[in-house]
Image (spheres, coloured by chain):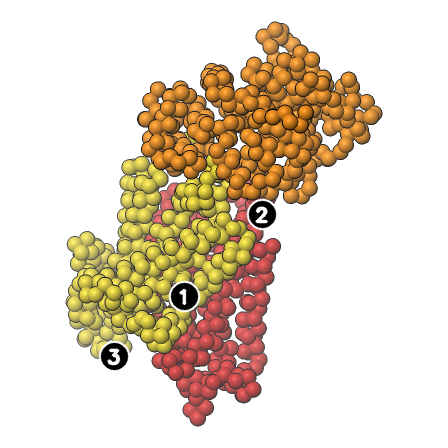
Chain colours: A yellow, B orange, C red
Amino acid sequence: MLRYVLDRVKSSVVVLLVVSIITFAVLMIIPGDPAQLILGTEATPEMVQELHTAMGLDRPLYQQYLGWLNDLLHLDMGTSYVYGESVKSLITGSLPVTLSISVFAMIIAVFLAFLFGMLSAIKKNSIIDYFSRSIMQLGTAIPSFWIGMVFIVYFGLKLKLFPVSGFVPLSDNFAGFIKSITLPSVVLAIGETGTLLRIVRSSMLDSLNQDYMDMTKVKGLGARKVYVKYALRGALVAPLTIIGMQFAKLAGGTVVVETIFSLPGLGRLVLSAVEHRDIVLLQGLVMFITAMVIFITLAVDVLIMFINPRIKSFQRGE
Amino acid sequence: MNEIINDNTVILKKLHVSDAVGNTLVSSSSMNIEKGEIFGLVGESGSGKTLTAKSLINLLPDDLIFSADEMIVAGKNMLEISLRDKKAHIGKNAGYIPQNTVFFLHPMIKIKNQIADGFIDHTNNNKKEALVKAEGILSKVGFSNPKLVLNYYPWQLSGGMRQRINIAMALMNDPKLIVADEPTTALDSTVQKQVMELFRSINEELNISILLISHDLGLVKNYSHSLAVMYAGVVVESGTTKSVFENPKHPYTQLLIDIIPTMKIKKTEPLAEIPGYVQEKGRDTKGCLFRNRCPKAMEICETYVKEHEEDGHYFRCNLD
Amino acid sequence: MKKNLSIATGIILILLVLAMWGLSFVYMPYPPNEMNISERFLKPDFDSEHILGTDNFGRDILSRLMYGSRNVLLVGIGSVTLGTTFGIALGAVAAMLKKAASSVIMRIMDGLMSFPGILLALMIVTVAGKGLKGSIIAIAIFMIPVFARLVYSMILDTENLLYIKAAKSYGTTNSKIFFKHFVPAMLPKLVTQYSSAIGSAVMIETSLSFLGLGIQPPYASWGLMLSESRQYFLTYPYLAVAPGIAIIITILGFNLIGDGLNDMLINRRSHDE
């Protein structure tokens, strides 16, 4: 099994390398002159040349790439053109916000998906089943910004239950923290619950069909033992894998929600970099976020392997 | 004579099982299992023996429908009981030993966490007491180190060991009836014998009735006290092992007995077989279902089958 | 049956959107960009001239909705078609080449797929520019690896099937094998993926427009309409209703079709066994 982990780590590193090449290529090579891009059309040729040299764009391409890569490995992502701060500090400042809403959103999604997924499977084709599945379809089609706006107006402004913008750090005030992340997390969760629910439901259906469920019938066990202890236990592998993927995707895709709720997270930073064409910042951000995504996916995969180590060998060998 | 107290473990009269579409799977089958008896239920695949057994212990798949004139299991009438009571009654009084040793134990749960939960639910014991009992039973079924075994996952054990776990699990509640569905088919022959001897000793020591399902007539002959032979969903003959083997009345039974391989067969002699195959559909006719393969079939067998019962030896045939 | 209901509903929804789209070329109540300050913020009223009301500039919402459908469908379907074409080509090429070259191609695809969708789109929009062109390119690039991977693995799987090996041994030409055997085997899965992809593409496009990086004002796009309605949402919530529902219907429609097809595929496979 250790070999499997090493394999995965190895291929993750390779993918990261490819990602770095793509990022570098897209942002440095394709626009022609990044310096021109940064300064825009109003800059004089002299200004462009100055920035050009300052950014080291006179060197041959591969040198630029290797130099950049080397800096990355030393955790130096350069200085943001727009903010003047080091990219690293900008990222570390925004990371907690993004992680908070991603984690909270995942918790909500997991709770709802398992609750309704299990119910749908147990009472297959009943009203609750159709209801869950319809809501699920709807959830994946609703744009997050739309529902976000609705929530802001209704829960935030009309009912005044939650703040409509801003982030209260955990260190400041726990209740304030929770309140500030609730609405955005719920909005994020709405998009993810549907997919997860479907997986939970189909895994549960498979598990309920297994022979070991017969034994629970003969033993005359009560519902909780039957469904949670036996059925659910056998239905965990697929949902856990999906949860890993979803969490990684969430962490990298909070741009819209952060914009609506004015949360100073990574997504907003990205948007700002795009709008101001801050190539350096954008480069660092993209690398960081993608690396985070790849790492989270890897970690979840390995975790699942630890939890159910023998399922794989069991299905293989026996 | 209605006053006679009948403490048979199973009284089944005219069981009928059909599927959601209306096909008959089992028809008009009856059997009685006495207390402390090993009862063999013999037949080919598709004969309905598994379905019959499963209907007794609440294991029939949800999409099948069954009915019977009488079905009494371990003293309770299974036809007039709520589902909840049925579950509780079966949980307390019956055990099931499946054919396949792999899939009936949950692969992700340790033995100690699944062997005892029926026991914990139906008695007032807690987990600790349950595990003590489990250890006792595990050593009885042949494990020299029960404590170690309890901590294993099912996939860490061999097939024979898993079957013993199944047996131990069935014994936890001191059941009155154990249904063993082809318990040795998936095992090698040396292990087979061990397991069958285990069944015999359980039956003799604890006086537990065992419904032994098998397609192996030889096995049933050696180990059961009584038996029933099923063909195409119908019990065609039943009675004590002695009387059925000494005096088989139904042509199917006769043929089955003939084809049991014995040591006396010459090497060059082909093994006997019954030509034809078991029909799946069209089982709800009033005629005899065996008529197409029966060497002694008569015209009347198309539409009518006579039932005989003498001294507990029952058979359905128009011959005498 | 549930799956047919899915597809049927999806098709109905898409037909609604297509109807709006088609109608937009023939008749719109008002020019979509025409501003009329004296008539701003009119609430929706079925009896009035502005059925769905007017926005903050006095532009007729229904007309903008219809006009916006053009952009949304153009970007949605256009980008996915582009991405599918390149993706299939790339996947097929990778499957034909062996070992090193195909490995490189697939690694690049893996790399592309590691980027979270919005992030990739934003990155590309930065260099390709905002607006219609940028959106289409960005989403197309996002779709390429999905289809490349799909085609690549399907070809490799099908290649090993006995009847292909048999056909090859008869001397059937490669192109004949491809069109007669591979394509029918791959088509169902591809169509399913295509439909679901359009759903995702519309979601990304509206997000991009909402963020101001997609279709630029004064042109209409549903995402843009929503973003413009943000500041007035408290006092005039109706501004967000029409574009929001239009988006939901479109995405839902394509997703339902994709899911329904997917269910059909799964069931068909189990029947064959």
Locate residue B36 relative to residue A149 in the image: left or right: right
Q: Separation of disc 2 and disc 1 at Cα?
A: 32 Å
Q: Nearer the viewer, residue C188 or B76?
A: B76
Q: Are marks 2 and 1 in contact (CB under 8 Å)?
A: no
Percent coordinates x, y for residue B264 in the rendering: 61, 6
Percent coordinates x, y for residue A260 in the rendering: 33, 71
- Which numbered disc, 2 or 3, marks the residue closer to the eye? 2
Q: Which residue is mark 2?
A: C268
Dot 3 lies on which element?
loop
Amino acid type of disc 3?
Glu
Give neighbour class at mark 3: few <14, some 14-19, many 20+ (Cα, 10 Å).
Answer: few
Q: Separation of disc 3 and disc 1 at Cα?
A: 31 Å
Could you tell me which chain the residue with mark 2 belongs to?
Answer: C
Could you tell me which chain the residue with mark 1 belongs to?
Answer: C
Q: Nearer the viewer, residue C72 or B71?
A: B71
Amino acid type of disc 1?
Ile
Q: Are marks 2 and 3 in contact (CB under 8 Å)?
A: no
Quarter in which the N terminus of chain A is drawn? top left
Give the label on residue A42, or none: 3
Q: Residue furthest right?
A: B299
Q: Is residue B61 shown above or below C200?
A: above
Amino acid type of disc 2?
Arg
